Image (spheres, rainbow, N blue to C red):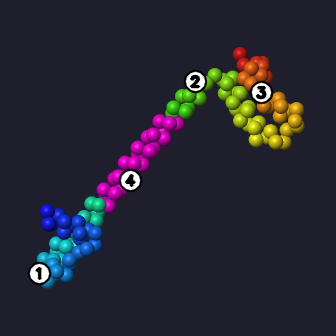
Amino acid sequence: PEGIQTGFEVLQGANEYFELLEADSVAAPIFFYPYVFIMIFVVLNMTVAIIMDGYLAMQEQRKADQLSELEDLVKIQPLTQMYRGLIRHLEPCAAFLPAAWKARLSGMNKEMVIELFSDYVD
């Protein structure tokens, strides 16, 4: 347990390298520097693995959300899509339209759009 604690202290920067050097001036650099070098790469790899795992999970969730949105869009009837698209594109222009057109736009419903596009839909 004391060796593990000392190992973590070395990784955190609280090293006792000079004490090791006083104990054995030949073995201290041979064991200390490779240990620090290898442990830094281990911790770095663990950090990158955690970040990549989260990133991949987020990407999979995003792809699943996009597919579900596309499936929902395909299930919507074409006339409903036309109605929503028409309303969405006309809303920003409502401020520039005459008052009579604004009233028409605010009162527009699905049936009115169906009537508008009835000639184009079989």
Dot placed on the residue nearer the N-terminal end, 2 or 1: 1
User: Residue 111's image quarter?
Assistant: top right
Q: Which residue is mark 1?
A: 23
Three-letter residue code for mark 1:
Ala
Tell me which numbered mark, 3 or 1, is placed earlier along the sequence. 1
| Residue 117 visible in image | no
* Gap between marks 3 and 4 measured at Cα: 49 Å
- As drawn, the residue found furthest toward the left would be 23
Q: Is residue 108 above or below residue 63?
A: above
User: Of helix, strand and loop, which one carries label 4?
Assistant: helix
Which residue has dot 3 on it?
A: 108
Left or right of residue 55, residue 85 in this image: right
Q: Residue 122, position in %: x, y?
A: 71, 16
Answer whether residue 71 is visible to the viewer in this image: yes
Would you name the residue on which mark 2 appears?
Answer: 75
Q: Main secondary structure of the magenta part?
A: helix
Up-down: is 115 above or below 93? Answer: above
Determine which of the numbered discs, if any, sits on residue 81 in the image: none
Three-letter amino acid code of the residue under disc 3? Met
CA distance separating discs 2 and 1:
76 Å
Give the SS element for disc 1.
helix
58 shown above or below 79: below
Q: Is residue 103 magenta?
A: no
The amino acid at mark 2 is: Lys
Judging by the rendered image, the residue that carries numbered circle 4 is 51
Magenta stretch bounds: 44-66
Are the residues at dot 4 and dot 2 in contact (C-beta closer than 8 Å)? no
At which x and y percent is residue 101? 85, 33
Give whichever of discs 2 and 3 has the lower sequence position: 2
